[in-house]
Image (cartoon, rainbow, N blue to C red):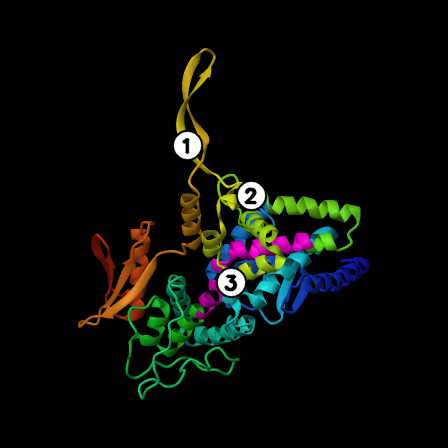
């Protein structure tokens, strides 16, 4: 980037920080870096700089790259929740786009520091992942790349089945915090299993349970499972606050740009980009749009301070369930559509067709439908027992979404292999699924 443009952006960063503080934001410190598109694609696929390697992230990189190059979207930036936060700006952005993105990032940074779901999120994930990659390189050299990759495959199939369970009471068979050193810098060693297993069941932390209690895993395998689990827990708050995060950051960038001096050309370009960001999607809900509109509605009713207080404690589902009233539905122009059979008259004769008809649904029905969709994060699976034969017993908590049986069977076999004995998945109203360890 030309030196003059870079200096102008640096000056704008200072101005944006001052405007953010005047507005009442308290962002975590942010380091901005301008990078090429390929770097943005890589960061988007991994989520954290310095991440350990696996083939699934390479697959995600090419999917993102293909979508962006085919015009299916655009990644203007990527911000990482570290200390300080890291914001990567796309070098091909116009100056107006860079300024909008900088203001947008300050909204994210305010939530990173102050949102209830992020207060205990580790801020050293970039360093932890880099240290994990060094350990994984050693494991590959010791046991072979294939064994490491296979272990990662199985762990990643369970990365959505994690939870922060309360610790067991201290006792002679439970050393204090046995995993405390696992994710410290490079010199930390692998996890060692407790000699006397003590279970707190039922638990939704399937991956953590296997890492801690499997009788067959080697120390390096426990380390791999715990690394995948910790990353999943790190990203969990971001998965449940996508609408809140993007809606709030979009509201903040619009407000800050209104308060800052942009040239007429920059203001027009920023307005165009903002309109693209909040444009409705034809077949789904745009989280930028719904989040922005709902928070804008709350700001009109409660002022910025009241809206910010709400945004700092709600998830996507709870924001909709608690604050999407009838007036908000009209403000956000939310409608349900259903396809209904109709007949189309053309050239003197009738032909069957289908019409999308706006449904004047009850607000409670619409709110429940949308909140449930935003809250769903995959099937809820609980470890409930280890039976007398050593089998691991799991249970699917029923919901409105059907369980994909083929997917469940494949994942259950990974569970059985990591456990080293048969695993049974109990299902309401259906025959249990059973899997044997892979040979």
Q: In this view, does 16 lie to the left or right of 129?
A: right
- The residue under label 2 is 331
Query: Is residue 7 toward the left or the right of residue 109 in the image?
Result: right
Seen as rendered, the residue at the extreme top is: 348
Which residue is label 1 attached to? Answer: 339
- Front residue of 92/80: it is 80
Percent position of residue 343, x then y: 41, 20
Tell which tag, 1 or 2, sits nearer the viewer.
2
Instruction: Calculate the distance from the C-alpha at mark 1 to the C-alpha at mark 2.
Output: 24 Å
Query: Do the numbered discs 1 and 3 sit on residues whose CB atoms are within 8 Å?
Result: no
Residue 132 visible in rendering: yes
Q: Is the magenta stretch mostly helix, strand or loop?
A: helix
Between label 1 and label 3, give the one nearer the viewer. 3
Q: State the residue at coordinates (42%, 38%).
A: 361
Q: Give the range drawn in magenta.
A: 230-255
Q: Position of residue 399 (x, y in %)?
A: 32, 53
- Residue 37 lies, in percent from the top left, at 63, 55
Q: Residue 300 carries which label?
A: none
User: Which of the marked residues, 2 or 3, is nearer the chain's N terminus?
Assistant: 3
Name the disc covering residue 313, or none.
Answer: 3
The C terminus lies in which quarter of the figure? bottom left
Does residue 347 appear left or right of residue 25 in this picture?
left
Which residue is depicted at the point 60% across and 72% down? 83
Q: Residues within 10 Å of mark 3 (few under 14, many from 20)?
A: some
Question: Earlier along the polypeptide chain: callout 1 or callout 3?
Answer: 3
Q: Is residue 335 magenta?
A: no
Residue 53 visible within the image: no
């Amino acid at each position: 980037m030309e030196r003059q443009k870079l200096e102008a952006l640096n000056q704008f960063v200072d101005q944006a920080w001052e405007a953010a503080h005047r507005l009442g934001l308290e962002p975590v410190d942010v380091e901005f870096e301008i990078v090429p598109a390929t770097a943005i694609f890589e960061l988007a696929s991994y989520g954290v700089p310095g991440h350990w390697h696996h083939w699934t992230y390479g697959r995600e990189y090419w999917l993102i790259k293909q979508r962006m190059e085919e015009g299916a979207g655009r990644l203007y930036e990527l911000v990482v929740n570290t200390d300080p936060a890291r914001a990567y700006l796309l070098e091909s952005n116009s100056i107006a786009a860079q300024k909008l993105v900088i203001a947008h990032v300050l909204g994210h940074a305010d939530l990173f520091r102050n949102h209830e779901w992020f207060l205990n999120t580790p801020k050293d994930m970039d360093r932890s992942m880099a240290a994990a990659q060094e350990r994984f390189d050693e494991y590959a050299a010791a046991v072979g790349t294939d064994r490491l990759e296979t272990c990662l495959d199985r762990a990643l199939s369970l990365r959505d089945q994690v939870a922060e369970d309360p610790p067991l009471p201290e006792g002679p068979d439970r050393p204090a915090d046995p995993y405390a050193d696992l994710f410290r810098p490079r010199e930390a060693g692998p996890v060692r299993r407790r000699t006397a297993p003590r279970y707190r069941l039922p638990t939704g932390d399937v991956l953590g349970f296997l890492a801690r209690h499997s009788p067959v895993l080697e120390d390096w395998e426990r380390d791999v499972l715990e690394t995948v689990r910790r990353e999943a827990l790190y990203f969990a708050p971001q998965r449940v606050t996508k609408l809140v995060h993007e809606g709030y950051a979009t509201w903040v960038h619009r407000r800050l740009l209104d308060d800052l001096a942009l040239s007429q050309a920059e203001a027009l370009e920023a307005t165009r980009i903002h309109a693209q960001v909040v444009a409705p999607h034809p077949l789904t809900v745009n989280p930028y749009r719904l989040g922005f509109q709902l928070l804008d509605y709350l700001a009109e009713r409660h002022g910025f301070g009241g809206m910010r207080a709400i945004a700092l404690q709600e998830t996507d589902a709870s924001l909709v369930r608690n604050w999407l009233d009838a007036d908000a539905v009209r403000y956000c122009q939310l409608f349900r559509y259903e396809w209904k059979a109709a007949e189309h008259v053309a050239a003197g004769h009738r032909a069957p067709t289908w019409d999308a008809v706006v449904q004047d649904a009850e607000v409670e029905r619409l709110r429940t439908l949308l909140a449930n969709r935003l809250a769903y994060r995959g099937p809820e699976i609980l470890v409930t027992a280890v039976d007398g034969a050593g089998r691991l017993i799991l249970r699917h908590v029923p919901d409105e979404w059907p369980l994909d049986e083929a997917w469940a069977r494949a994942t259950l076999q990974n569970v059985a292999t990591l456990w080293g004995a048969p695993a049974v998945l109990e299902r309401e109203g259906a025959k249990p699924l059973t899997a044997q360890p892979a040979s």
